[in-house]
Amino acid sequence: MIPIRDENPTRRTPWVTVLFIAANIAVFAYQATLDAAALQAFWTRWAFVPSRFLADPFSPDQLATVVSAMFMHAGWVHIGGNMLYLWIFGNNIEDRFGHLGFTAFYLVSGAVATFAQTAVAPASTIPNLGASGAVAGVLGAYMLLFPGAAVMTIIPILIFIEVARVPAYLVIGFWFVLQLGNGLASLGPELATSGGVAWFAHIGGFVAGLAIAVPAAIRSRGRRRSRARVIR
């Protein structure tokens, strides 16, 4: 299932979501100007490397990579998928948390995602990069806060393509089950030396976003109960 938009209006302009998307695109455009050697050097310097970080976790240079890695991507599909999900779901989370609150939420979710991947592969020398962990946090919060929101979704069925309105909890729940299954399948001694998708960053970011959104969900349900009592 590939979401293309949601039907969940907001009250305020999602400036932070737009800025995050613009920053990711700007960094990717800069990467496109680099030759192969310069690009590798750029990734080595600014991406997050678990073993390097753990060797000196309080170094300002290493701490900076926790954030800088969130704005780097390895290819068009990588950045395209992340920015699509951020555009569809980020505006409603920003609307609920406010601009500053969403900024903190996004960065904390991304950091938790990074450390979740580090926890399962602490000896890895592979650079970790991408907004996937932070975006996964957005998905976790969205599923909790807006589970019934309609999401226009592309559903491939054999050789046919169907576009349908699907509840957010099904779209995002399906996505999370895929991440969890792939993450568990990736566990093994070769995890520290193999590249590919950082599945546990997705899982960690999702769980972080879900947890951070719990107080907002409780407040929202309390307000709904209060309105129901007034109506009666």
Image (cartoon, rainbow, N blue to C red):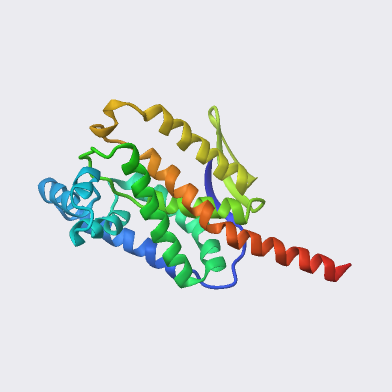
Above or below, 230 relative to 189 = below
Counting labels gives: 0
Residue 183 appears in which quarter of the rendering? top left
Q: Nearer the viewer, residue 23 or 139?
A: 139
Residue projecting furthest to the left: 37
Q: Residue at x 54, y 27 (%)?
A: 158
Can residue 17 be seen here? The reply is: no
x then y, percent, for residue 78 = 35, 46
The percent position of residue 45, horizontal first and vertical second, equals 16, 53
Q: Is residue 124 left or right of residue 182?
A: left
The relative height of residue 41 versus residue 189 in the rendered view (above or below) is below
| Quadrant (top left, top right, bottom left, bottom right) of the N terminus | top right
- The residue positioned farthest toward the right in the image shown: 232
Q: Residue drawn at (61%, 46%), measured in percent from left and top? A: 169
Instruction: Determine the image quadrant of residue 192.
Output: top left
- Which quarter of the figure has residue 58? bottom left
Q: Position of residue 26 (x, y in %)?
A: 28, 62
Give the image location of residue 219, x and y in percent. 65, 64
